[in-house]
Amino acid sequence: MAYQALYRVWRPQRFEDMIGQGVITRTLKNAITTNQISHAYLFAGPRGTGKTSAAKIFAKAINCHHQVDGEPCNECETCRAITDGTLNDVIEIDAASNNGVEEIRDIRDKVKYAPTVADYKVYIIDEVHMLSTGAFNALLKTLEEPPANVIFILATTEPHKIPATIISRTQRFDFKRIAASDSYERMIYILNQKDVTYDEQAVKVIAKAAEGGMRDALSILDQALSFGDNEITLDNALLVTGSVAHELLATFVGQTLAGDTKAALATLQSVLEAGKDAERFTEDIIGYARDLLLYQQAPQLVEEAEMGSVSDDFQALAKQTPAQTMYAMINELNAIQQQMRYTTHPDVYLEILTIKLAEIGQQQGQPAPTPTVAAAPVAEPAAVKVLQREVEQLQQTVKQLQATPAAATTATPAAKPKPRVAKSSGTKEVNLAKVYPVLGSATREKLNQLQEVWPDLLNSLSVTQRAVMKVSQPVAAADSGVIVAFDYSFLYQRATTDNELTDALENGLDRMIGTALPVVFVPKDEWPVIRKNYLAAHQAELQDHSDSEAPKQPETAPIVSKAEELFGKDIVEVKPD
């Protein structure tokens, strides 16, 4: 007989042979023993985790007349026929190559016929997400109400591509990735049964390289057996998987963390000369850095993943490496890994990566910068006294200015001073040179026009720009510009430095009202102070302007008239002093 691959020879034939899916196998066995069998099942999960194997075992168990506790006997004629794939009542379909409407209609036409030999007719549709939309629609009604003694088992690695109407008509079982320790134990069992010499570390390397797939693990094991002439060694396992030895990884990472660029580049060169894959090497470094970071918080998780083989050097490196350094390394590794996918020279990227990682390690080893004041000489008391006197004088000056703010703003009306609103440290100062000209010609009618189109203007912005402008509103408008107030100072800060946002607003106004008005931003909490300062600073100008016009009612002061013109009579309230 021709040689068969390990994953075919050691394919599970009973539920108890399945690895890492205890919850699913127990549920299916209980459903069989209690005769609570559904008409449709959906097995979803990563590749090589036992979905199709579970479907065949389930088909055998429900048709086996000698089953015990939900397990098929695998001895009767029906069980052997299903195992060999010769029973006509168990139909396995590959949806990747039979994904059209005609194939599903053929199933729909034949499903009405009763099973010929077995008790149940079972349809196993593998990779069901590959079916076309028309095929899913053709399957829908049959899946909802199939004839008696017909069971559908759908298997897929991408359940998100299956319509919700299909999923709602099935019992869904999510197969999980198989732990490396479970894969390791299964491979050890198979190697012992085959009486093969093996290195335990080599089997662990294969288990980790399989990434949760039992079929992948057995395929790699089969390849390693062929390469090593029916013997599993660590060197052979590393060559077959393309992985790098744990000791070499530890050496490379240790050299980069120490900032030894020259030694790290030499280690990298030895890795490349050994023919290791660049992307695989990057993944190994990411995994090693992740283990270092994880070991600082949850050592037991790393010990379980490494199956108990955590070296003393690894533990020491994890203790002495700051978490921030590991974050920076992982970010750099991820960035380089993304770039390597689109290059034909991955070796160059690995060399650049090595230099950057060594720079991160050098930054880790540098002492923290000391404040300049601490480094200053302390033997000059006279200079210190001079500085103290200057500070006291500045404090007195600030108190005097705070006590007489009105006098400071109206002392020289002829010069038309432009007072600035007091700002907290780190906040951008309001540009009153742009605000005051708008206030000088602002009208309520113009503001009403702006407020009407404001929601449409915000909707025309990008998502990011709309998020910034969501908590803003126009508070004054004229033919010379519009003033926009922000509820939060940090958003005001961001808007004032975003030229693209300003251009988008002005272009939007040009489209909606026919004029590209300049936009000026102010914080909402400082807007009342800006208005008050403007009216106070321009009171004399407003008085002269009112005297030159037609006489008004004596009780209407010029400053009140200007306020009503700016903000509307409905919101201006005059209170006596």
Image: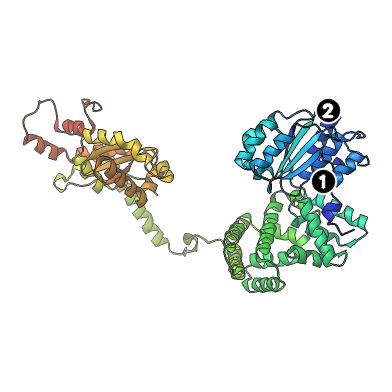
Q: How is the image coloured?
A: rainbow
Q: Position of residue 347 (x, y in %)?
A: 62, 70
Q: Position of residue 461 (x, y in %)?
A: 38, 44
Please tell me which of labels 2 and 1 falls first in the chain: 1
Tell me the kind of residue under disc 2. Answer: Asn
- Residue 310 showing in the rendered view: no
Q: Residue at x 83, y 57 (%)?
A: 5
Q: Cβ–Cβ below 8 Å for labels 2 and 1?
A: no
Q: Position of residue 443 (x, y in %)?
A: 20, 35
Which residue is label 2 attached to? 35
Tell me the kind of residue under disc 1. Answer: Ile
2 or 1: mark nearer the eye:
2
Q: Position of residue 113 (x, y in %)?
A: 77, 32
Label 2 crowd (10 A; few <14 / some 14-19 / many >=20): few
Label 1 crowd (10 A; few <14 / some 14-19 / many >=20): some
Look at the numbered disc 1 and give the secondary structure of its residue. loop
Look at the numbered disc 2 and give the secondary structure of its residue. loop
Label for residue 19?
1
In this rendering, would 120 be left or right of 414? right
Q: CA distance from mark 2 to mark 1?
A: 25 Å
Give the image quarter of residue 272: bottom right
Position of residue 448 relative to residue 10, above or below, is: above
Give the image quarter of residue 236: bottom right
Q: Residue at x 26, y 46 (%)?
A: 516
Q: Quadrant of the C terminus?
A: top left
In this rendering, would 486 be left or right of 131? left
Q: Residue at x 13, y 25 (%)?
A: 555
